[in-house]
């Protein structure tokens, strides 16, 4: 009988410890999933803002972009890193965010000759650069989303 009590006294704390560790792992995994979902949502919002910028060239959309890209960068900086692979993935995300910022800047640039005029007065080169940016930006944004889904 004493042997069974001793065995139970050893097994029960061990089982409780394993349960607590498992619960912590589940909580961390849930937190990681939520962070990925938030990043996907933010990337989708960036895509919408980029389209609005391309269509309307309003300061409002540029302000929205600036605030959202800063938010996305903060989200990435807050993500938990537990492996070198995760660190590599986050570095790649940061590079894609930087590329998105570079491409977005092309959408908002107007030459001195066209500043203040409607977009119909853009030079052929400016129009081609903006068209390329409009088509390239969603591709990079989709890469960010895909990296979080996979």
Image: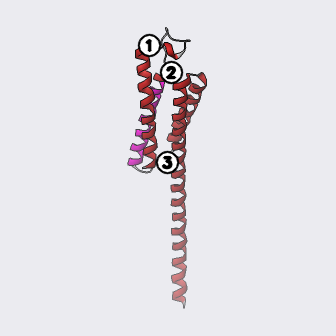
Q: Position of residue 115 (x, y in %)?
A: 53, 12
Residue 63 placement, left or right of 29: right
Dividing the image into 4 quarters, which one contains the N terminus?
Answer: bottom right
Tell me if residue 99 can be seen: no
Q: Position of residue 131 (x, y in %)?
A: 43, 24
Magenta-drawn segment: 85-105
Q: Nearer the viewer, mark 1 or mark 3?
A: 1
Count of numbered marks: 3
Q: Which mark is residue 94?
A: none
Q: Which mark is residue 80?
A: 3
For this orientation, the residue located farthest to the right is: 60
Q: Which mark is residue 108?
A: 2
Q: What element does badge 1 sit on? A: loop
> Is residue 102 highlighted in magenta?
yes
Front position in the image: 140 or 34:
140
Q: Nearer the viewer, mark 3 or mark 2?
A: 2
Q: CA distance from mark 3 to mark 2?
A: 34 Å
Q: CA distance from mark 1 to mark 3?
A: 46 Å
Q: Which residue is mark 1?
A: 123
Q: Nearer the viewer, mark 2 or mark 1?
A: 1
Mark 1 or mark 3: whose residue is earlier in sequence: 3
Front position in the image: 99 or 119:
119
């Amino acid at each position: 009988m004493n042997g069974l009590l001793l065995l139970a006294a050893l097994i029960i704390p061990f089982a409780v410890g394993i349960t607590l560790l498992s619960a912590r792992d589940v909580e961390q995994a849930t937190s990681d999933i939520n962070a990925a979902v938030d990043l996907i949502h933010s990337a989708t919002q960036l895509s919408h803002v980029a389209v609005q910028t391309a269509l309307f060239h309003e300061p409002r959309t540029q302000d929205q972009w600036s605030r959202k890209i800063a938010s996305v960068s903060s989200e990435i900086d807050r993500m938990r890193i537990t492996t070198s692979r995760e660190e590599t993935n986050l570095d790649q995300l940061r590079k894609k965010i930087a590329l998105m910022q570079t491409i977005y800047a092309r959408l908002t640039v107007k030459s001195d000759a066209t500043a203040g005029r409607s977009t119909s007065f853009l030079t052929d080169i400016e129009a081609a650069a903006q068209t390329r940016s409009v088509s390239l930006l969603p591709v990079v944004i989709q890469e960010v989303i895909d990296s979080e889904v996979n």
